[in-house]
Image (tube, helix red, strand yellow):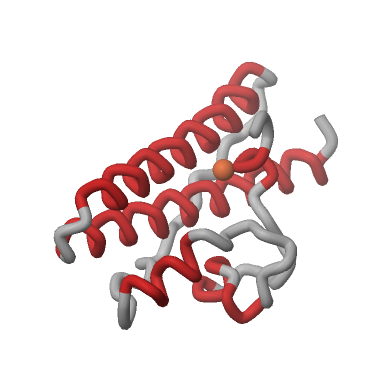
């Protein structure tokens, strides 16, 4: 494996963990606002992102590469309304989404970057 690929995969781990945190934060907020169906859905999305991270980790370990687990900062934990949350949640990863609304920008993710494993197989 090239150094660039190893670096890229390890950097991608951070995106997976961040996405998982974002979705988990949304799930918590939705539960607090008595929206259990949405909350369950977002909890599932959070779990899916962790699974994506685990796939990368498994691949690196199988290829005898060094895994670098990233630190993940706290995600946004509240939204003004269910409308604001909906606009954000249902456009994550959309290339049509204005960059200021991309969830990653709330974390400092580079505008336009996206989680490649999030969309694989969908
Ligand atoms: Fe993902």
Q: Residue at x 39, y 38 (%)?
A: 47
Q: In this view, does 68 lie to the left or right of 9?
A: left
**Left-right relation of 44 to 108:** left
For the point 84% across and 36% down, the residue is: 2
Relative image position of residue 51 (x, y in whole percent): 47, 32
Foreground pick, 46 / 10 = 46
Q: Residue 30 sits in which quadrant?
A: bottom left
Whole-percent x and y of residue 116? Answer: 69, 44
Q: In which quarter of the image is residue 56?
A: top right
Residue for point 73% across, 39% down: 6
Pinpoint residue 25: horizontal percent, then vertical percent: 31, 60
Which residue is rendered at x = 49% and y = 70% of the image?
87
Quarter placement of the C terminus: top right
Residue 41 x, y percent position in the rendering: 35, 44
Q: In this view, does 70 lie above or below 119?
A: below
| Tally of marks | 0
Quarter of the image where the N terminus is located: top right
20 displayed left or right of 61: left
Query: For ligand 1, which image quadrant applies?
Result: top right
Q: In this view, does 22 lie above or below 43?
A: below
């Amino acid at each position: 494996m090239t150094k660039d690929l190893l670096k890229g995969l390890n950097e991608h781990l951070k995106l997976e963990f961040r996405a998982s945190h974002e979705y988990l934060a949304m799930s918590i907020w939705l539960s607090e606002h008595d929206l259990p169906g949405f909350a369950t859905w977002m909890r599932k999305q959070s779990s899916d992102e962790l699974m994506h991270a685990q796939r990368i980790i498994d691949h690196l370990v199988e290829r005898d590469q060094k895994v670098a687990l990233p630190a993940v900062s706290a995600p946004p934990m509240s939204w003004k309304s269910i409308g604001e949350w909906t606009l954000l949640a249902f456009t994550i990863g959309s290339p049509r989404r204005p960059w200021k609304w991309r969830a990653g920008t709330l974390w400092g993710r580079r505008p336009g970057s996206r989680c490649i494993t999030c969309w694989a197989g969908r």
